Image (spheres, helix red, strand yellow):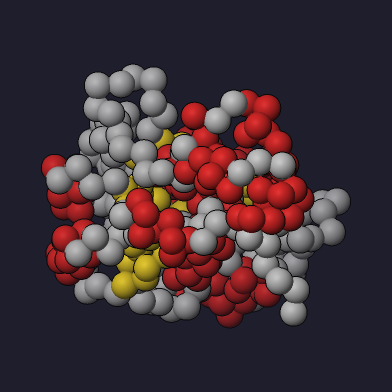
Amino acid sequence: MARMPTVDDVARAAQVSRQTVSNVLNTPEIVRDNTRERVQRAIDELGYRPNASARRLRTRRSATIGIRLDPLRDGISGAVLDRFVHKLAEQADARDLRVMIFSAAGNDDELSHIRRLRDGSDVDAFVLIGTDHGDPRIAWLVDHHVPFVSFGRPWGAPADDPRHRWVDVDGRAGVRDAVLRLAERGARRIAWIGWPSPSGTGDERRAGWVEACGLSESDQDALACVTEDGVAHGRACADRLLALPEPPDAIVCASDSLALGALMAAQAAGLGDLPIVGFDNTPVAAAVGLSSVDQPLDDVVAAALELLFGESGETVRPNPDSNEEPTHRLLVPRLVERRSTHLLLDGNPGA
């Protein structure tokens, strides 16, 4: 097995002292530009990685991010958060950071875990998954000046509060693009299956349907079905929509779970060619050929880590008095179109 390069190897390659290498790694601002560049070039060429454990002892930082892992519901929509956690672990490792995963039964239980981990200095910062109106986790973290970023915006609160850093995907734009695409293909009565309000994410996605569907308010009321997430719920909603005197000629859903249920209902009704679009672009959607709105999770994770740690790798504490520090990112999703028996899109061989 090849020996891992050391600080001494870097020093010899860059023709500097061991202390200079240490300065470049820990206090680069005190090193002259040309020397710092020479050392960094040696680090890159040798593939040297600083000893994370030693750095943690020296800086008294855990270099650890805490995140709650939600239980899978039907194994479809939950797969998005599972992928998010995996990508967070991968990108954190590239920054010499660790991810601590913990489970919790609701927001109050999550807060008890956060307090314990913070008091024990086990975690430097937290990533919240999912945000709600009046989210108690956000209020506590802000009040106690704990570094955090959320995957989900502050529903019902100012979006530009510098004390709350967040990353989100523009669900309204994603659904709007899907509806417009179906309309381009001739659909005129595009139905919506979504979640009960208030649901920040669900309400945003429904707003995209409202903006693009071109239906009167009465037709919107008739062609919108509200339900909890899940395949069975999606199927029940689609059954009711397809039984209308004027049934929809396409259906857009707030999740792939709901879309899969709608697909089952359409096939049972002998409408296998009914266009159906989901949201999240899960492996299930790909397997059955459902078109779906894809969330750019790699970009979401990269943005979250940048907001938390910047380029230096040190925790960036928000400055409530600064209007220049970036505090959030709103990313645009894309529609993944697939050719199948239930979604015929001209000239697209599928994905």
Whether 79 is drawn above or below 173: the answer is below
249, 68: nearer the viewer:
68
261, 320: nearer the viewer:
320
Residue at 55% in and 72% down:
260
Q: Please give left or right for residue 3 compared with residue 70 in the image.
A: right
Whether 97 is drawn above or below 300: the answer is below
Q: Please give left or right for residue 351 compared with residue 299 in the image.
A: right
Q: Position of residue 252 (x, y in %)?
A: 53, 55
Whether 279 is drawn above or below 78: the answer is above
Residue at 28% in and 28% down:
319
Residue at 40% in and 77% down:
72
Residue at 60% in and 73% down:
284
- Residue lying farthest to the front in this orientation: 17
9, 351: nearer the viewer:
9
Q: Quadrant of residue 60?
A: bottom left
Q: Quadrant of residue 343?
A: bottom right
184, 19: nearer the viewer:
19
Q: Please give left or right for residue 270 compared with residue 171 in the image.
A: right
Asked whether the viewer can see residue 211, the reply is: yes
Q: Position of residue 240 (x, y in %)?
A: 42, 68
Asked whether the viewer can see residue 219, the reply is: no
Q: Quick one: quadrant of the C terminus?
A: bottom right
Q: Quick one: quadrant of the N terminus?
A: bottom right
Q: Position of residue 243 (x, y in %)?
A: 47, 67
Q: How many marks?
A: 0
Q: Position of residue 244 (x, y in %)?
A: 46, 62
Whether 301 is drawn above or below 264: the answer is above
